[in-house]
Image (spheres, helix red, strand yellow):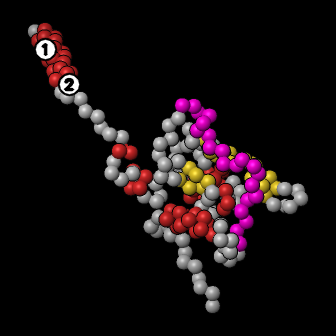
Amino acid sequence: MSAVSEYVGNIKDAVTSIFEGMAVTASHFMRKPYTVQYPDRMPVRVQDTLPFRYRGILEVDLEICTGCLACERACPIDCIVIVAEKDPQTRQLLLSQFDIDIAKCMYCGLCSELCPTGSIHHTTEFEGADYSLESLIRRFVKDPVMAYKPKKGPETDSRIAPILNRGMTYLDQWAQPGGEKPAEEEPA
């Protein structure tokens, strides 16, 4: 008899759950529809509320890129492609390609952590949707660009100094508690 009572109990549970689901569905027919506004309809832009170190879409400041390829080597899924060659006449390093495939990027931050000048960084931009994968490849080099060569002292170029300061601020804020950079010694 327990098999028959279990069978009848299963039928009762099935009918009850069907009617509960249909009651929820029917209640939506009676409700007035409403639309939740997308975040850009908020009084303050979402990008303005995000912290400085938010991991959004990657951006590169080629003016301060040293061409060290650290970001390309650190990327675990190979979404960064850099081609850097030495110019035979000037013996300077030229960047002829710097591409980031945003469709592959997992926003881990490993590339921006290792950059010595902070030239590669995450922005507060988070809307990366597009209709084709090809348009999600960001190509930062149009014509070959000379790689930045850091100076021994402070940067003297008034055009590069603010970009370098922003990049170094980005790197300084990456430091975690217990992993801070040692304080610089003052010259005697």
Q: Which residue is mark 1?
A: 12
- In the image, the segment drawn in magenta is 131-151
The vertical placement of 156 against 93, above or below, is below
First reached walking from the N terminus: tag 1 or tag 2: 1
How far across and how far down the image is residue 80, in percent? 64, 46
Residue 88 falls left or right of residue 151: right
For badge 1, the amino acid type reads Lys
Q: Which quadrant: the N terminus?
A: top left
Quick one: 147 or 75, which is closer to the camera?
Answer: 147
Q: Residue at x 78, y 58 (%)?
A: 93
Q: Main secondary structure of the magenta part?
A: loop
Residue found farthest to the bottom: 188
Tell me if I can see residue 82 in this picture: no
Residue 180 falls left or right of residue 29: right
The residues tagged by marks 1 and 2 sit, at their Cα atoms, a distance apart of 25 Å
Specify the label residue 80 is tagged with: none
Q: Secondary structure at mark 1?
A: helix
Tell me if I can see residue 98 in this picture: yes
Residue 85 falls left or right of residue 165: right
The vertical placement of 177 against 131, above or below, is below
Quick one: 71 or 127, which is closer to the camera?
Answer: 127
How far across and how far down the image is residue 78, in percent? 63, 43
Specify the label residue 28 is tagged with: 2
The vertical placement of 167 against 77, above or below, is below
Quarter residue 153 falls in: bottom right
Q: Residue at x 63, y 69 (%)?
A: 161
Quick one: 111 or 121, which is closer to the camera?
Answer: 121
